[in-house]
Image (cartoon, rainbow, N blue to C red):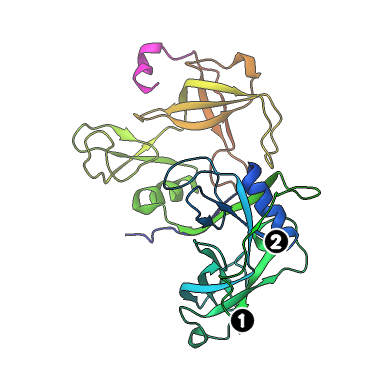
Amino acid sequence: MPDVLKAPLVVEFPFTRSLGPVQSAFLTGLRERVILGVRTRDGRTLVPPVEYDPVTAEEIRDLVAVGVTGTVTTWAWNHAPRRGQPLDRPFAWVLVKLDNADTALLHALDVPGPEAVRTGMRVRVRWAEERTGAITDIACFEPYDGEDGDDAEVTVHAGEFEGPVHGIVAQARLDYTYSPGRAQTAYINALAERRAVGERCPSCRKVYVPPRGACPTCGVATAEQVEVGPSGTVTTFCIVNIKAKNLDIEVPYVYAHIALDGADLALHGRIGGIPYDQVRMGLRVEPVWTEGGGYPDHYRPTGEPDAEYDTYKELL
């Protein structure tokens, strides 16, 4: 059996969210070195603050300032920090119950090793030098030799700051290694030779392209390879009018489902070589390859008569 392909893959996008009055006050407060919690009707102080009481579901807006020191309630050692984490050296993830708070805040604790961490130890905030109104305005926590400050007076806070933060953008990113599996490895290797191969179900005899290693209808494993195409039929399509970032294709263009000859499942492909408003269901097309390309760049009309609807209606 040939080696199964694998490659690193990154999924990344900016996640933008607006902030309500509670979260806005909390993040703006961090910028000003103030940590705010929210007070529930029964007197609990929640940090980080939330907009609704998790016990009663009541809306809560009463903000109070809590301490910048606190107590570690539990922890875990991070021996290999990843990209984007608070520190670039080994550190402890800790839950810290800040003085005068009743819930714990998750952040990093900067200590030389796990032997320097313990549940119940006192810590304090280390502020970032440049603060923008984000949780990263707390650079991390550090050990603190002072006394417990839970008996200090709780300070009511209006949550009003100059230039409040109203929204945040978080970069969501997932790094992982992807393997297409045995069936799709064979499909990709065939594309490198400018061929298209599918696999036939031993039960229903349908040919699926791209192959998945199992029949989606019968649920049985597939192994028999079948070469299909290269020509095919447009079964349905859409006209794209919004230009995608980093995609050098002028709009409008057509993206279609194409049933390759001999296949029982349509695949995706861009249609070129014809005005977008002349693309139609039943149009016969063939692949166009670019030098060094691992898959067809687009499909163009073959010049054949359109396929009869009955020949592809089951593939819509």
User: Quarter of the image containing the C terminus?
Assistant: top left
Q: Give the residue displayed 69% in from the left and 63% down from the top.
A: 137
Q: Secondary structure at mark 1?
A: loop
Answer above or below: position of 51 versus 268: below
* Residue 308 sits inside the magenta stretch: yes
Type of the residue with mark 1: Tyr
Q: Is residue 168 magenta?
A: no
Q: Residue 156: horizontal and vertical position, in percent?
A: 66, 54
Nearest the eye: 276 or 146: 146
Which quarter of the picture shows residue 126?
bottom right
Q: Is residue 131 above or below residue 60?
A: below
The image shows residue 303 at horizontal and vertical percentages of 55, 18
Real-space Cα separation, disc 1 to disc 2, in angstroms: 18 Å
Instruction: Estimate how packed mark 2 is, as few (under 14), some (14 to 19) or many (20 or more) residues with alpha carbons within 10 Å.
Output: some
Residue 312 relative to residue 43: left or right:
left
**Highlighted range, magenta:** 306-316
152 up-or-down from 311: above or below: below
Q: Earlier in the sequence, mark 1 or mark 2?
A: 2
Q: How many marks?
A: 2
Residue 15 appears in the rendering: no
Residue that mark 1 sits on: 144
Q: Secondary structure at mark 2?
A: loop
